[in-house]
Structure formats: C-alpha cells, structure tokens
Amino acid sequence: MFRTIIAVVKLVAFMLGKIGLLRKAQRLDREGKILERDALVNSIVPLWARYVFEITKSDVEVEGLEKLPKDRAVVFIANHQGLMDIPLLYGYTGKPMAFVAKIELSKIPLLSSWMKLLQCTFIDRKSMRASLQAINDAAANVSKGYSQMIFPEGTRSKGKPHIEFKPGSFKLAFKSKAPVVPVTIDGTWRIYEEKNRVMPAHVKMVIHDPIETENLTKEEVQELPAKVEKIVCSRLSERAV
C-alpha cells in the first residue's frame, strides 16, 4: 500500500509541475494555434505515460512498432487488462492519439484538461443520442489526423480471460475509414489489478499489421470484429485468453 501511495503522490506532483505548460497549451488552443498546441501536448503526455511505468518499476517490451503507418491516423483496437493500458499506448507507440471516455472523467481536474487538449471525446452512455454524437465527433477527429484507441471488451479483464469483443465498438473505425491496428496488451493487470496495489511487472505490447477499413464489403464489415479479436488473442498469454 505504501508503494501505491508514493506512486499516486509522484503522479500528482508530476501533473502539478506541468500546470504552466497546461495553461500555455490552453492559450494556444484559444488562439487557434493548433499545430503549436499539439506539439506541446504531445511532448508532455508521452513523458507522463512513461513516468507511470518508471514509478511502478515496471518494464515494457514492444513488438511491431515498424508496422505503424507514419503519415496516417489509425484506430487502435486493443484488449483491456488494466488501468495501465492507456499510459502504455500513449507512452510506447510514438503516435499521438485520443480515446472515447466516459463523461464522468470530464469532471476530474487536471486530467480532464489534458484529455480535452488531446482531443478525447466524452460519452454519456445513458443517452443514445449523445453516444452516437460522441462516435461521430471521434471519427471527425480521425479525419483531422488524431488517432483513436478503442477497447472493444468494454471493461477491464483484470487478469481474467479476455472478454468477448463488442462489434458495436468498431463503429468508430468504420465511420472514420482509417486503418485498424490490432494491439495485444499482456501484463498491465499485474501492476495494479492483481493485488489492488501497485506492484512492478513485465508488460508486453504487440502491434499487428494494419487492416484497411475503406471499401470493405458488407460481409467483410461483419467479419472484422471477430477477425481482429482473433489476431489480438493470438499473442495473449494462456491465462488471459
């Protein structure tokens, strides 16, 4: 528990130490200086993400970085093991991205401010209309060059076998017509979810070959969720499958 408290204190201190840069990024946003805003934000967030693994004394192994398109936004489709999945993607893909988050996160100070600057979309799951609008907004952001991450399981598996992918989660990928990049995440749950306190762990992330979503037939659209799920699970440890 002591290690967990120390980790939280260090993360809060990190974020407080970047308030000046946060305000600068917000000013650039208000002034419409989007390229400058993005450059600043995307220099800070990966540092924060990697710091998360540093303070938990966890090591990260990444495979397949060379497969990522360098000049196109993509939609990352990954399994969801734990709280550390998002820092893993931000810190170790080298690609700026956003994600669709539950609206409750928009009320958390500092965190929500950075999320808005990252072009994250907040979704009210209680409202079908609001949920549809959130997907449309996220798809529009992909067309502007902001990659997105999706966890089709809908919740964290926390070290248990993966949860079946929800086909509806792929709507964003189809609307944006961006390449889908399957990602296998293995080991993040050991950092916190295994014992409900911070522990060091070995984490592996495998980036698979991109899959084009434009000009798919109706049959290919229907088959894609199961296809991606199979690819992601192919590199999970036996316990997580």
Image (cartoon, grey):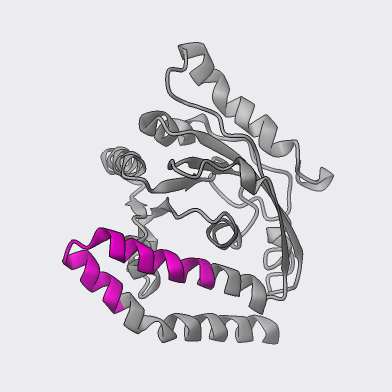
Overall secondary structure of the magenta section: helix
Residue 58 seen by the camera: yes
- The magenta segment is 23-47
**Residue appearing at x 54%, y 40% in the figure:** 152
Residue 1 seen by the camera: no
Above or below, comparing residue 56 to residue 227 in the picture: below
**Residue appearing at x 42%, y 28% in the figure:** 174
Q: Position of residue 45 (x, y in %)?
A: 46, 67
Q: Nearer the viewer, residue 215 or 66?
A: 66
Q: Position of residue 131 (x, y in %)?
A: 33, 42
Above or below, comparing residue 240 to residue 179 in the picture: below
Quarter the N terminus occupies? bottom right
Task: Give the mark count.
Answer: 0
Above or below, comparing residue 64 to residue 104 in the picture: above
**Residue appearing at x 56%, y 24% in the figure:** 224
**Residue appearing at x 27%, y 40% in the figure:** 133
Q: Position of residue 146 (x, y in %)?
A: 38, 48
The verdict on residue 25 being magenta is yes
Q: Is residue 33 left or right of residue 96?
A: left
Q: Nearer the viewer, residue 113 or 71?
A: 71
Q: Position of residue 136 (x, y in %)?
A: 30, 38
